[in-house]
Amino acid sequence: MGERKVLNKYYPPDFDPAKIPRRRQLKNQQMKVRMMLPMSIRCATCGTYIYKGTKFNSRKEDVIGETYLGIQIFRFYFKCTKCSAEVTIKTDPQNSDYIVESGASRNFEPWRGEEEAAEKEKKKRETEELGDAMKSLENRALDSKQDMDILSALEEMRSMKSRHATVSYDVMLETLKRSAYEKHLVLAVKMQVSQCKL
Ligand SMILES: [Zn+2]
């Protein structure tokens, strides 16, 4: 079995790598890539949901004339699992994500909206604070107030929990029993009083 794992190959002394004919490769040739769907999508032709993690064979190509900060954007072509309609997706380096380009629509993902809103808020704040010391001070004061509020709410919840924790089931049952007994007594007394009146 030793011959199966050869690490060094014999090169004859007259070997000239320049003499090897170059393989002509077309510019931006499409490449076959087996990949997994990075998000759940819905086919626009037949309406089938194709779930995240579905494996498929795709053709990969460079998106010509489209880069993000010098990073090449790729396009993947693949077929719907049911109707074989072509779907294309693109990489989105800006958001470290993918974009559905055609043939399908991306499923609604609630966490994405949240993330986007948070990002927008952060950006807005940064632009506001740029060269405005007063605004940044104000924002920081607001932040500390929010922290204090959260802390006090937490403290309140903790104290409430500890108050509840001191009541054991036995005490609770005892109290219930006693109150029921008292109610019973009161009823009996009332009945006796009404009988006396008669
Ligand atoms: Zn389809």
Image (cartoon, rainbow, N blue to C red):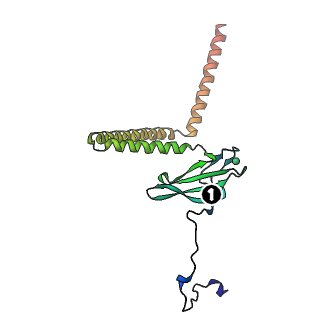
Left or right: where does residue 47 sit relative to residue 90? right
Extreme residue toward the bottom, this view: 13
Q: How many marks?
A: 1
The percent coordinates of residue 195 (x first, y second) are 67, 11
* x 53%, y 86%: residue: 16
Left or right: where does residue 127 sit relative to residue 162? left
Judge whether 82 appears above or below 128 on screen. below
Extreme residue toward the right, this view: 82
Judge whether 48 appears above or below 55 on screen. above
Left or right: where does residue 192 sit relative to residue 147? right
Q: Nearer the viewer, residue 115 or 105?
A: 105
Q: Nearer the viewer, residue 191 or 50?
A: 50
Judge whether 86 appears above or below 170 on screen. below
The percent coordinates of residue 198 (x first, y second) are 67, 7
The percent coordinates of residue 41 (x first, y second) are 63, 47
Q: Where is the N terminus found, in terms of image quarters?
A: bottom right
* x 62%, y 17%: residue: 189
Q: Amino acid at mark 1?
A: Met
Secondary structure under the numbered disc 1 in the rendered image: strand
The percent coordinates of residue 163 (x first, y second) are 47, 38
**CA neighbours of label 1 inside 10 A, class few (<14), some (14 to 19), many (20+):** some
Q: Nearer the viewer, residue 133 or 139?
A: 133
Task: Name the residue beneath numbered marker 1.
Answer: 36
Extreme residue toward the top, this view: 198
Rendered image quadrant of residue 77: bottom right
Rendered image quadrant of residue 159: top left
